[in-house]
Image (cartoon, rainbow, N blue to C red):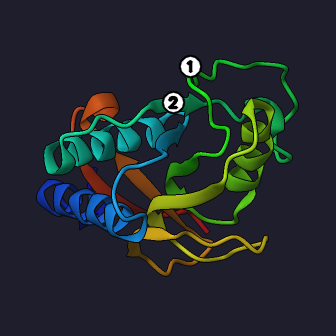
Amino acid sequence: MSDLILIIDDATLTRTLKRISHEILERNKGTDNLVLIGIKNKGTYIAKRIQDNIKQIEGVELPLGELDITSFRDDDAKRDVNTSRIDFSIEDKVVILVDDVLFTGRSVRAALDALMRYGRPRRIQLATLIDRGHRELPIRSDYVGKNIPTSRKELVIVKLKEKDGEDGVYIKKLDE
């Protein structure tokens, strides 16, 4: 993995998610009416860690859902697939939508479209581990782990223990 440059190590990733968890609680004045929904796949793992952090801080386990945006994307061939798992009402709730990397904003746009199939939340807030800029849509994150300005010739790779066996965020330069 010599072509990967480590920009966030495992300890920093853990601290970053704890900070985001505190920020969510502060902005919303506690846990009332909060639900967490991770954008499948890595957003779900990050949302679960935020859920665990909030349980440690407040003693409350927030509802946690998983949102599959496959059939709502505009940059892939449409596939009518839905493996979302949201087994609670989002009506009049504050939804914390969680993703690993915010780049063009297209995944978040797809997630907003998919989420509306489940009801009308009071508010939707976005939490992302990494914001790398290059927005194509007017979307911003309410909670950002780290802003990492990148070029379009770079790739941000988020590795999580649950999926990759390690925690870390890397930049990889793409071939010219």
Q: Nearer the viewer, residue 44 or 170?
A: 44
The quadrant of the picture occupied by the C terminus is bottom right
Q: Nearer the viewer, residue 42 or 172?
A: 42
Q: Is residue 138 visible?
A: yes
Circle 1 sits in a helix, a strand or a loop, which is it?
loop
**With 2 as the anchor, is 146 left or right in this view?**
right
The residue beneath circle 2 is 65
Give how far across and how far down residue 158 sits, in percent: 38, 51
Q: Quadrant of residue 85?
A: top right
Give how far across and how far down residue 163 sits, in percent: 34, 30
Check contact, mark 1 vs mark 2: CB within 8 A: yes
Tell me the kind of residue under disc 1: Asp
The structure residue drawn at horizontal position 50% and vertical position 33%, both measured from the top left corner, is: 41
Give how far across and how far down residue 161 sits, in percent: 24, 35
The residue beneath circle 1 is 87
The structure residue drawn at horizontal position 78% and vertical position 40%, both measured from the top left corner, is: 116
**With 18 as the anchor, is 24 left or right in this view?**
right
Circle 2 sits in a helix, a strand or a loop, which is it?
strand
Tell me the kind of residue under disc 2: Gly
Q: Earlier in the sequence, mark 1 or mark 2?
A: 2
Q: Nearer the viewer, residue 113 or 106?
A: 113
Q: Comparing marks 1 and 2, which lies closer to the viewer?
A: 1
Q: Is residue 3 visible?
A: no
Q: How many marks?
A: 2
Give how far across and how far down residue 124 sits, in percent: 62, 56
The structure residue drawn at horizontal position 71% and vertical position 35%, both measured from the top left corner, is: 69
Q: Quadrant of residue 89?
A: top right
Q: Label 2 crowding class (10 Å Cα cut-off): few <14, some 14-19, many 20+? A: many
For the residues labelled 1 and 2, the Cα–Cα distance comes to 7 Å
